Amino acid sequence: MNSNPSTTHAAPRAWRASPLLRASLAWHAAAAVLTLLRPHWWPWTLGAVLANHLALMALGLWPRSRALGSNWTRLPERAAARLEVAITIDDGPDPEITPQVLSILAEHRARATFFCIGERVDQYPQLVRACVAQGHAVENHSHRHAHYFSLLGMGALGTEIERAQRHIERASGVAPRFFRAPAGLRSPLLDPVLQRLQLQLASWTRRGFDTVNADAATVLARLTRNLGAGDILLLHDGHAARTPAGRPVVLEVLPRLLAAIEQRGLHAVTLRDAQS
């Protein structure tokens, strides 16, 4: 897949299935032929097909898997050579938290990538514009962030992603280039949709689980363990957990994370920056 998608208006490309999906299609075809030639083998051929489906489902539950299609789990080598890392911030924009995140990033002169939910972009377009105006990237995190996203058919996936794409571009003036699935969960049907829309799937190198863990020290430790050039780190401005004092965890973690990045001689850039 082309790792430099530009806009949703580019000419569609022919879908190229991953080697695993090609093998899966061949598996299905072989099972069908065997069933026709040896009808009494149907329990075995059916079992083989079901096992194949279970394997694909398992891979979809592994956000960092590349078996279902192109997936950024780290920055390109040229970005790592420049000592770059990427901080990605999901599930916003949030009217309380996002402005404070932007202030922290500005203090450290760092850039981040915001994976935004289309519905929230509609609610707070001014925050999306502020992100872009301050040099950050705003990318596609689906329109509704539905928990059943990975169960959608190809048409529904396309609708969900294209809606977010249109709304983010309308609010920011810039078409997203990257997509991140809700919770990172996906199905084999997602890759052809992303190829058609010329969007690059991006997951992460490590995440802090800051939507469920209220302990800032633990979240920070997860993000900084073996921190190095080329890492993609995940935090949340939407759905953020809160410390016992009621403060969003991301606001406790982000300044310390940026300090750790600086201490290691690294630079926080957007995913778009890392493509250059």
Image (cartoon, helix red, strand yellow):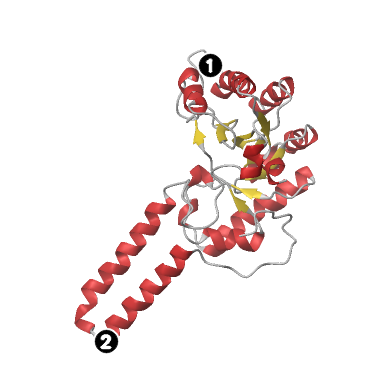
Q: CA distance from mark 2 to mark 1?
A: 66 Å
- Is label 1 in a helix, a strand or a loop? loop
- Is label 2 in a helix, a strand or a loop? helix
Image disc number at residue 43: none
Compared to 261, does 68 lie above or below? below
Instruction: Write the residue at 27% across / 87% down.
Output: 37
Quick one: label 2, few (<14), some, or many (20+) residues within 10 Å? few
Disc 1 residue type?
Gly
Compared to 122, does 29 lie above or below? below
Quadrant location of the N terminus in the rendered image? bottom right
Q: Nearer the viewer, residue 229 or 195?
A: 229
- In the picture, measured across the screen, residue 54 lies left or right of residue 229, that is left
Residue that extends furthest to the bottom in the rendered view of this protein: 37
Check contact, mark 2 vs mark 1: CB within 8 A: no
- The residue to which callout 2 is attached is 37
Q: Position of residue 109 (x, y in %)?
A: 74, 24
Work out whether mark 2 precedes mark 1 in sequence or the reverse, and give the earlier one. 2
Compared to 178, does 253 lie above or below? above
Disc 2 residue type?
Leu
Image disc number at residue 246: 1
Q: Give residue 36's quadrant in the image.
A: bottom left
Instruction: Write the residue at 37% across / 52% down.
Output: 58
**Of marks 2 and 1, the one in the foreground:** 2
Instruction: Write the residue at 64% across / 25% down.
Output: 97
Q: Position of residue 26 (x, y in %)?
A: 40, 74
Q: Give residue 128's quadrant in the image.
A: top right
Q: Nearer the viewer, residue 167 or 193?
A: 193
Q: Give residue 133's quadrant in the image.
A: top right
